[in-house]
Amino acid sequence: MKKQMLLSAIALAISVQVGAATPDKADIKPIGAQSQAAVAASHVLSRFHYKATPLDDAMSEKIFDRYFKLLDSDRLFFVQADIDQFAPARTKLDDAIMQENLTIPFAIYNLYQQRFNERMAYARELLKGKFDFTSDETYQIDREKADWPKNDAEAKDLWRKRVKNDWLRLKLAGKDDKAIRATLDKRYENYVSRSRKLSTEDVFQTFMNAYAMSIEPHTNYLAPRAAENFDIAMRLSLEGIGAQLQQRDDYTVVREIVPGSPAALSGKLKVGDRIVAVAQGENGAFQDVVGWRIDDVVSQIRGAKGSTVRLHVLPADAGPDGKLAQISLVRNKISMEEQSAKKSIYEVRDGTAKRRIGVIALPTFYQDFEARARGDRDFKSATRDVARLLTELKREKVDNVLIDLRNNGGGSLNEAVELTGLFIDKGPVVQQRNAAGRVEVESDTHAGLAWDGPVGVLINRSSASASEIFAAALQDYGRGLVIGEPSFGKGTVQTLWNLDGHNPTDKPKYGKLKMTVAQFFRINGGTTQLRGVQPDISLPSMSDPDNFGESSYDNALPWTSIKPAVYIPAGELKEIVPLLDKKHEQRVSRDKDFQYLEEDIAIVKKLRKDNVISLNEAVRRKERDQQEARAKLREQRLTAAAMSPDDPVLVPDPKDVQLKTVAAAASASAAASAKNGKPEKKVAGVKGALRTDDGLQADERGLAADLDAEKAAKAAKDVLLMEAVHILADEVGLLKTDTRLASRVLPYVADLGK
């Protein structure tokens, strides 16, 4: 009773001090289901988590600090007095959760919203004046570890520098004052507009994540809508019309149309079209969606397969007052193929020989759990897709296969085990230890290999979880080369816990927990936790281990080890790695693109280390001129050399009609140029290269320009992928020319030399 009275007194004091937090919008308040969900989550987290932690005063302090961090990570909105104002609640959030009283966390959010509005109003006011770009001021890029501004005056000075930097970026890009003022005023107005669309569900999810992530970094609370989106991402399918949408100002704009979808088959919906109203069924009333949040619009357009949705669309080329088109579409199942495994083949010259390297890019370890559970024989699965691609690569007689897991953050543990099974002939893949200390071994139980040739795995800092299980297993078996940079270091296993489980309803109320329940270990007994998978051959990295990866978390689980599993290595690659590494070093020392990439990485790392940027126009202009000079040199080199004869050549897929057409057009163009005595030279950028700053944000560029830039980025030379392909080609050459080496390194591919 005393605790309840104290909480009420704190909440009352806070409400008096905060006052009318957002005069143009009512304060956001919790709803009953959220208070109940918080209690339910606390029971689960304190009993069943791998690192079960009581919800007490110590945890309350962690939640308090993390909640402020999640709301204001760069410490640009709150001031120290705001933090001090809520100090009495620092050890009371545990009581607030258990007593179903979420007044305090919502009061903190409402004060944040007030401060946000104040900072945006000040930023827009600054645009009416002028800035002095001759002074030697600097702006701190990353303020995550900075102190809170002491007072409002210090916060305003931070924002003055931030707006000054935004202005200078646009000025250096060639914009005049009028255009700069209009661009920035619209940008800050959009910030406010988006913040006003945040709901009670958003605030509650942020607060609950402050709790969940205070236990361990990979434990999260998913509100009902977030839980639905997570399920869709895992099964790579949904039911709807097949249009990828994005927010531009107050409009929901069609960014992409999925081939074969209802939207594509209708031929009526175009990229750039703006959806202004949505109606359900043949006779439902239209609901105006201008100004809505993108996920609210998406929820209206999604629906059951076979149902009808009608849209009022403002065509891409029409003005704001243009004539609306009405489109009726029948929803269907949409496969998100852009996230599926994809293959390509590269040919590499090796003296007089050509090595064919198959590359399989796998963005995530996906599986349609629901379809598998109900016995659907054609359920979507990463392993099934990769197995099919390997069969195709066999038919196309590739010499080596590279599995590209860069930026693959994981997914299904079961998929990681089964995918490993495509490359080993039965045996353990990964070990799991639960909270009770019991260790279980997850094994491939299927005899035979889908691919028995040499294999490599390409990873980067964003390769995590299931990606690390797969890479580590192939490394421990001596089955494949791991190339790239150290991986993320996430060695924990999560499961979804449905908080509505005991209160089943047609519409979820409480959401789900993505909760850590075990830690996984390599079959050699070590873990990828914290340290990640170390590559056999290293490639340069732009990532910052101090700010990205498991080691950057303040509460990550420590590295540890257990007893190794019983397994029989399939090969021993240690003998061949130094030979390949030597060839790699010799090659990149001659590769201009690789050297340019290393220069860019050095620049990024220096910026990160300095953590400040000059606000002096002369200094910034000199830096920009140097960057443009570097870019011009690269362009000249690419124009002069086109593609180096040593570069891997992409082999068109004969089944792909679109590629066939592109290849035919390219051949015709090259033939025409040859007749004129001028061989055609294609100029492409380099993936990962620094680009000239235009000062704009993504949604401030025209959609066509944005899509063109995205297309150009995809078409740019992927320096790291090309070098990984070269390394695997070198491996094939060594194994084919030295059968004794092959028999020692990879016994099962010793016949490569025959």
Image: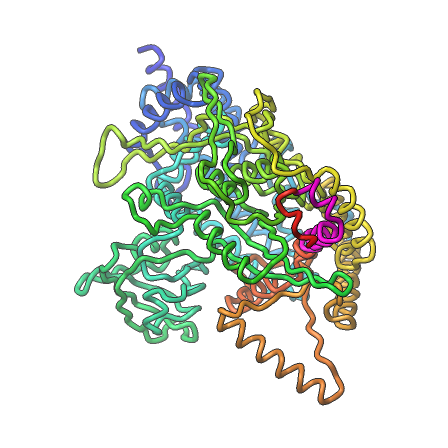
Q: Is residue 301 above or below residue 329?
A: above
In the rendered view, does 595 fall on the left or right side of 517? right
At 79% across and 65% down in the image, what residue appears? 633
State the predominant SS element of the stretch in magenta: helix
Residue 740 on the magenta span: yes
Residue 446 on the magenta span: no
In the rendered image, the residue lying farthest to the left is 283
Looking at the picture, tell me which residue is in the foreground, 334 or 389: 389
Residue 403 horizontal/vertical position (percent): 58, 49
In the rendered view, does 566 fall on the left or right side of 587? left
At 34% across and 52% down in the image, what residue appears? 378
Q: In this view, does 280 lie above or below 573?
A: below
| Rendering colour mode | rainbow
Where's the C terminus, which quadrant?
A: bottom right
In the rendered image, the residue lying farthest to the bottom is 675
Rendering quarter of residue 513: top left
